Amino acid sequence: MDSRLQQRAGAQLGPEAIGARVASIITQYLADLPGRPVFTAYPADLATALAVEPVPMEGARVDAVLAEFLEKVAPYPFGNGHPRFAAWVNSPPHPVGIAAEALAAAMNPSVAGGNHAAVHVEHQVVRWFAELAGFGDPPDGVGLLVSGGSAATLTAFAAARHRAAARAGIDVREQGLQGHSRRFLLYVGEDGHGCARKAAEMLGIGSAHVRTIGSDDAHRMRPELLRAQLERDRAEGGLPVAVMVSAGTTGTGAIDPIGAIADVCAEHGVWLHVDGAYGGPAVLLLQRYAYERAAISRADSLALDPHKWLYAPVDAGLLLLRDRQGARDTFSLVPPYLRTDDDPHGVGGPVWFSEYGFDQTRPFRALKLWFLLKHFGVAGYRAHIEHDIAVAARLATTVDEAPDLELLAHGLSVVCFRCHPPGHPSDALDDLNREVLRAVQLGGRAFLAGTTIDGVFALRACVVNFGTTESDVDEMVADVRETLARHR
């Protein structure tokens, strides 16, 4: 290759040198995180420059591109690697997962199917999770890795819609939801994740046909209200498709009464989908949730997000489905005479993952989970999750003891609270807490999220960081209270 082509390709550094430089950058980046501001807003001048920079017509050296990365990208992360980042459910990726992600990128397979390592590793990882969830061994069920909990829920609801339609004599794959008068219906708790409504819209069911089931004082779906709603809908000719329960809501960490809801679903023959995107790992691994874990084993589908509380790099969502054949009937577009049935020694390999979901091109998501499960084991994961729950409990206790703070909800590793200084007008508390939250987020000392709890604005912390300590949450509370003192 002549020098000009080498320059255009940015190839002056060979693979070994590039790898060593990138490894050094990653190592330094992770080492420096705890001492940096939790969050720094992206500078306006850099944002403007990126917005107008033209497409590169000539290539640059790799070291020059890395230098630009260090100047314009690395200093401005989302913040979720920092031990005092407790907003939303964004965990830091464990270094082992980062390494595995790089190795998967180097192999770069498309995991639609075939008889190659990535396919068999994904089958193994899925089987491990199926065993933990009590979903039984193949060939009874099936699972696959997807981009996240939203994609997992969409996939599960598509399979549920197919089953409900088939029972009603409707060929939903051929005719869709047109040409009949039946109303397809979905059911979700009022504290359930918004992905249920997105899925309803994408599947042609429509958000108007998502029934919202009320919660009790602990923010858990009420089974008796679900039963009454199902009875009304059936009496009116509706076609219930699926019920989504939460094994740890994003808002408060509440766990719905899955066993009682499973009973209701069994009575009415309705698909039960468990949203365990956030709290699923705790329920599947910790002994204190043995009852809830047993109830999950009765579900038709389960969504997990290993990129949340299992510390895997984004993206890594997981869906388990109890009915393997039903999932294949929902998605497969391969004629029966061409189906790639199990052929362990041929090129085709096992039935392709692309027959059980929407994606045809699928990345090697399983490798990072394989590495992490091998590295931590169940015991290691239990210890990390117990640590996060204990740190969150410390936060809840500290908030509860503060005279100017009010604890509003606490479940799993989620803590919701608000600033409530004595004598402050009640009708001005929401505005006060919004001001405090914005100042805290931009201050760089800690980072929390905002939410609404029982009609009031709240600050929300979620501890899913194996590096967060009790001193970190003490620092978070101190930052909130000092900020409050400046805004009263």
Image (cartoon, helix red, strand yellow):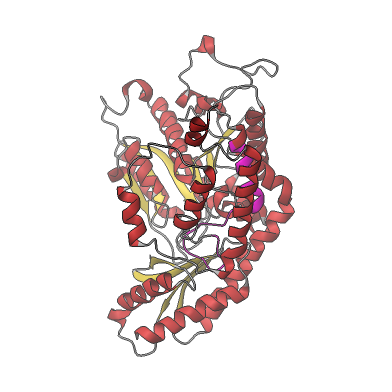
Q: Is residue 216 left or right of residue 117?
A: left
Residue 401 visible in the displayed image: yes
Residue 143 shown left or right of residue 163 in the figure:
right
Which sits in the foreground, 209 or 253? Answer: 253
Residue 432 at what x, y percent from top left? 33, 78
Q: In the image as oriented, which residue stretches furthest toward the top?
A: 337
The residue that appears at 58% across and 48% down in the rendered structure is 306
Q: Residue at x 70, y 60 (%)?
A: 383
Q: Quadrant of residue 161?
A: top left
Residue 346 rendering spot, x and y as whole percentages: 67, 15
Please determine whether, in this image, residue 183 is positioned above or below residue 372. Answer: above
Quarter of the rendering containing residue 204:
top left
Give whichever of 45, 100 is nearer the camera: 45
The residue at the far bottom in this view is: 423
The magenta stretch is 81-105
Up-down: is 226 above or below 163?
Answer: below
Residue 292 visible (yes or no) = no
The N terminus, quarter of image: top right
Residue 197 in the image, given as x and y percentages of width and height: 35, 46
| Number of marks drawn | 0
Q: Residue at x 40, y 49 (%)?
A: 188
Q: Which quarter of the picture shows residue 210?
A: top left
Looking at the rendered image, the quarter that the C terminus falls into is bottom left
Image vertical order of residue 412 relative to residue 185, above or below:
below
Is residue 371 found left or right of 75 in the rendered image?
right
**Does residue 131 belong to the magenta stretch?**
no
Q: Position of residue 150 (x, y in %)?
A: 44, 44
- Vertical placement of 43 versus 443: above or below? above
